[in-house]
Image: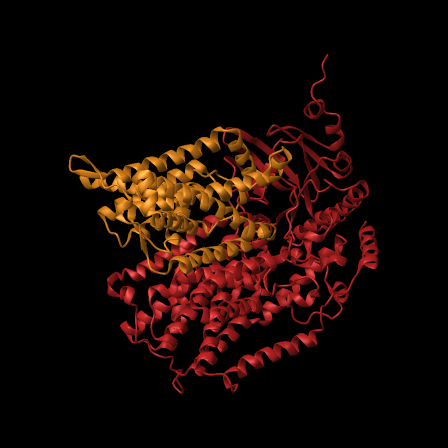
Amino acid sequence: MADLTSKLTQRISQTQDQSPRRKFPRAIGLILLVLAVALLGAFPLLPFVNNYLIDVGFIVGIYALLGLSLNIVLGEVGLFDLGHMAFCAIGAYTTGVLFHQLQLPIVILLPISAIVAGGFAYLVTSPVIHLRGDYLCIVTIGIGEIVRLVLQNNPGGLTNGPNGIGNIGNPDFGLFSIQSPTQFYYYIWIVIGLVIIGLINLQKSRVGRAWNYIREDEIAAKANGIDVRAFKLLAFVLGAAIAGIAGNIYASKYMFIEPNNFSFMESALLFCIVLLGGLGSIPGSLLGAAVIVIFPEIFRQFATYRLLFFGAALIAMMVFRPGGLWPRRREGLGFAGLGIRKLPRDENALLAEAPVPPRPGTVPLRTYRLPPVTVAMSEGLTLETKAITLRFGGLVAVSSFDMSVATGKITSLIGPNGAGKTTLFNVITGIYRPNKGKVIFQGRDITKLKPHTIIGAGIARTFQNIRLFPSLTCIENVMSGPHCHAREGTWPAVFRTPAQAREERKIVDLASYRLNQVGLWAFRNELAKNLPYGKQRLLELARALATSPSLLILDEPSSGLNDKESEDLMAMLQVFLGEGFTMLLIEHDMNVVMGISDWVTVMDMGSKIAEGPPQEIYNNPLVIEAYLGKEED
Amino acid sequence: MDTLIQQLINGLTIGSFYALVALGYSMVYGVMKLINFAHGDLFTLGSYIGYTVLVVGASWVTATFGIWGGMAVALVAAMIGIGVAGLVMERIAYRPVYKAGRLPLVVSALGMSFVISQGIMAIWGPNPQAYLSGWTPKDFLQFGNIRVPVLQIAILVLALALMALIYWLVERTTFGAAIRAAAQDRDTATLMGINFNLIIIFVFALGPALGGMAGVMQGLKYTRISFNMGWLYGLKAFTATILGGIGNIPGAMIGGLLLGVLEALFEGYVSGAWKDVFIFLILILVLIWRPTGLFGEKSAEKV
């Protein structure tokens, strides 16, 4: 059987393998980058550049830094943040207030401002982080307004109300202090450079990928072991900290801050910067900032009309280039776009090098803490549900349901449409919490665990209506699998520690192996949404496998597949069985059910009506009645 | 006690402005899933249209139709003008962007907001304008110690009547059912023979028209209008919409009235400077407690 899959794979690879497309060679990109950096560096020294232009360059820098910080929240995670200036305000006022109250030097206040802004973001967003789209949007607007109004109302005489805080000092690094426009120009752009290096490293790590998974499909992200809440909060905290740094630099340059510097209008501008540049695109944010600052400057002579033009330009941009000026490209970059060190040039070599993954259930769990093993399980069982009941309003979807799944076997759950099968799967994987009953997995009570912890414990699933990460490549999709066993967090990713690099390499190895195993290696650099339906199912399967689960739960894996594809799928499932995976299926295709199941449980109207070996079930009158109705006589 | 009643009446009045603007937000959102950030500025534009009708025609509009007639003409002019403006806006700023997704739409809406508010400034100037006292009735009704201007009562009654009309239209007529169906599922509604374009036209004409009328009412009540007042009204109305549950028509009305009353009570008894902080805190607390607003449907995503 293993033979069969590899043959299949080969056939596909031979016919459809393609090398990554490139618009232009890497060398030209590098030269352009060097030129851009050189231009930025030389800008204040050019003959026609006066202090006014240098200050414009500084403002572009401030907005670029803020745009980059919002891009984390809005671009990478897709969270609707229209109050981002609040975090900049917190940074600026932390600097202003502490400078006057405690006479702390500006340079020391830089990290303090970042920490205070980040901490503030954690406090105010953690109660509301679960809100969806537009609700989160109004809350962020509300937070922005609350911060501005509080500063204006001068609590405890600290903020000096609408008059603002003046006489803020310049940054002094001991050997030299930053005062002139040129010095400030270099100061902000050096900070931006450092921030960008960190952000690129983050973007191309499991942290950045986790953010993108959440943006693409929150539920699928959860079901693949991503702690959605934690990663959303991380984005807010990081974004706020960088905005806080921008606030500190702004305050030290103008030596004066007032509440109206941080109005809704400014937050809206930041939002426009990110979208003008392109969601999740770092060069896009820089470009967006340049447009937002320079455009009104050019139209300065039209004084009263310039914002009018600006508004019209925003509309025109969205009409003609809705993806932004410099959208982030994923396809066509090949594995180089993953940013993993020391990958072989030929991607196929990776396949040869990739080690066979360890047996299911032996992958050490690192990230999540599980409840202790307290329940003695019957011999040979992996999963048991005990009297699970779930009600939706008055409807009892699952009623006192007992089921067991034998280790190393394929168990099928069948039943008419609406019987509650998928609901039961959702209870097992933690997406719903049952009203009564327990889910026991390998002796652990996992009933109350969150979905991402359950997957870490070793239960992976696929969805009835496929849920992939549509705008990410196939390999990136599968790379979400090993996420739940990875340990290296944010800082190792920012600094690219050797341990982090090794871990990333392991992730890509495992993902490659699984992608190849389901026969999709040839499509590794295609976006998931461009695959045909049958291949999308396989991709989802590969993604679930890549979490290295002990138990694989498949929700109608053969639905929408033709006979040939179903057969291939069955062969593939047998291969997985041979590897040691335990499987639980919902399946309607009786050929599949009868062909590969070791045990069949039948569900109707939320209750179990029968269970037994396939042949027995096939002839069970109760089952026939549930499917076909009662025979009239 | 007197203060309480006075503040309640004031709160209901401003709350009815919020509610009318919120209705527009909610209707457009329900059908298009678009937060129309330019909506508050259409409110302002309505205010200025009413102002212009009364200024330009002060000699004959008010003279011909009387004080009440003059106000009615201003309201109708704003209603028609803003209804048309809403349609034009949809055509140039939103329709070409729908397919690009929701975030580009937000930017387009923000751009539209700049265009309208800056356009008003370019036409009528940056300084605030005033509805002159000669245009409005100055009668009072006396209840014990409380004096309530007749105008305020008329505004409140009109606003409530408009809300009742919309409620009837959306909840009790076949066309309303079509709107609600389109809001639930655009494709299925179209397949069932509902003309989606007609519904877009309806919500983008009627929603803004209500806001435009609210703009005139606010001018009549508070006399002072300025080119940038729209964003605060828009923000409050948006808050009201979310409080009531976005896309929910009765929710928007109740949310608006509730917001107005809470605001007036807080201003009357605690502090004017902190009232907006209070309002946003209420909003956040309500959303923590009920993540889809007071009357929003609990939307468990189908897995």
- Quarter residue A493 falls in: bottom right
Task: Give the residue at x 38% y 38%.
Answer: B254
Is residue A129 visible in the rendered image? The answer is no
Front-most of residues B75 and B242? B75
Q: Position of residue B52 (x, y in %)?
A: 37, 50
Q: Residue furthest left?
A: B145
Front-most of residues A204 and A191? A191
Q: Position of residue A457 (x, y in %)?
A: 58, 50
> Judging from the image, what is the letter of the chain drawn in orange?
B
Is residue B233 visible in the rendered image? The answer is yes
A167 sits to left or right of A31: left
Q: Position of residue A40 (x, y in %)?
A: 54, 79
| Chain A rendering hue | red
Q: How many marks?
A: 0
Q: Is residue A612 above or below residue B234?
A: above
Front-most of residues A309 and A595? A309
> How is the structure coloured here?
by chain
A290 sits to left or right of A410: left
Q: Which quarter of the rendering shows the C terminus of chain A? A: top right
Q: Position of residue B241 (x, y in %)?
A: 42, 44
Task: Give the residue at x 78% y 62%.
Answer: A18
A97 sits to left or right of A223: left
